[in-house]
Image: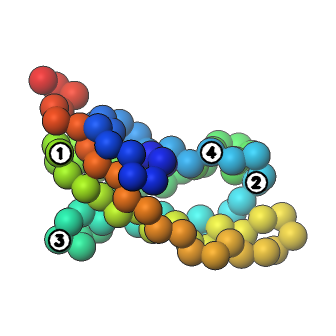
Amino acid sequence: MPRPSRTRTQVGSETVREGSTSVTDVQVIIKDPSDTAVQGTLSSDNGNTLWTFTPAAPLAVSTVYRVEVSGAKNDSGNVMAPYTWSFTTGETSPTE
């Protein structure tokens, strides 16, 4: 995922969360300024340490999005506390 408060994130890019610990049951919701969830798919690598959210359509330019991550569970069954942050997309789309 883009780091908290990051600006100029590419609008057509995949959004990635990477960690050193394997986690399952990850839930990622990205919301636009009107609090509408961005449609897309969430996938992980074979070790469940790299999670990728791919939006179904490019994100809007120069827009603040809020990311909500919850439910991630490690191998011991511990569930992470929900975590929320925001990022801002760049000023141009990938086709410009």
Identify which residue is drawn at 44% across, 62% down.
Answer: 85
Packing grade of label 2 (10 A; few <14, some 14-19, many >=20) is some
Q: Amino acid at mark 3?
A: Ser
Identify which residue is drawn at 37% across, 59% down.
Answer: 86
User: Which labelled disc corresponds to residue 34?
Assistant: 3
- The residues bearing labels 4 and 3 have C-alpha atoms spaced at a distance of 27 Å
| Of callouts 1 and 4, the N-terminal one | 4
- The residues bearing labels 1 and 2 have C-alpha atoms spaced at a distance of 33 Å
- The residues bearing labels 3 and 1 have C-alpha atoms spaced at a distance of 14 Å
State how the image is colored. Answer: rainbow
Q: Give the foreground label among 3 and 1.
A: 1
For the residues bearing labels 3 and 2, Cβ distance under 8 angstroms = no
In the displayed structure, would residue 81 be above or below residue 3?
Answer: below
Packing grade of label 3 (10 A; few <14, some 14-19, many >=20) is few
- The residues bearing labels 4 and 2 have C-alpha atoms spaced at a distance of 10 Å
For the residues bearing labels 4 and 2, Cβ distance under 8 angstroms = no
The residue pinned by badge 4 equals: 18
The residue pinned by badge 2 equals: 22
For the residues bearing labels 1 and 2, Cβ distance under 8 angstroms = no
Identify which residue is drawn at 65% across, 67% down.
Answer: 72
Q: Amino acid at mark 2?
A: Ser
Per the image, label 4 sits on a secondary structure element best described as: strand
Q: Is residue 76 left or right of residue 43?
A: right
- The residues bearing labels 1 and 4 have C-alpha atoms spaced at a distance of 25 Å
The residue pinned by badge 1 equals: 62
State the image coordinates of residue 54 (x, y, percent, origin top left).
39, 46
Number of marks in the image?
4
State the image coordinates of residue 92 (x, y, percent, origin top left).
16, 32
| Of callouts 4 and 3, the N-terminal one | 4
Whether residue 29 is visible here, answered yes or no, is yes
User: Which labelled disc corresponds to residue 5?
Assistant: none
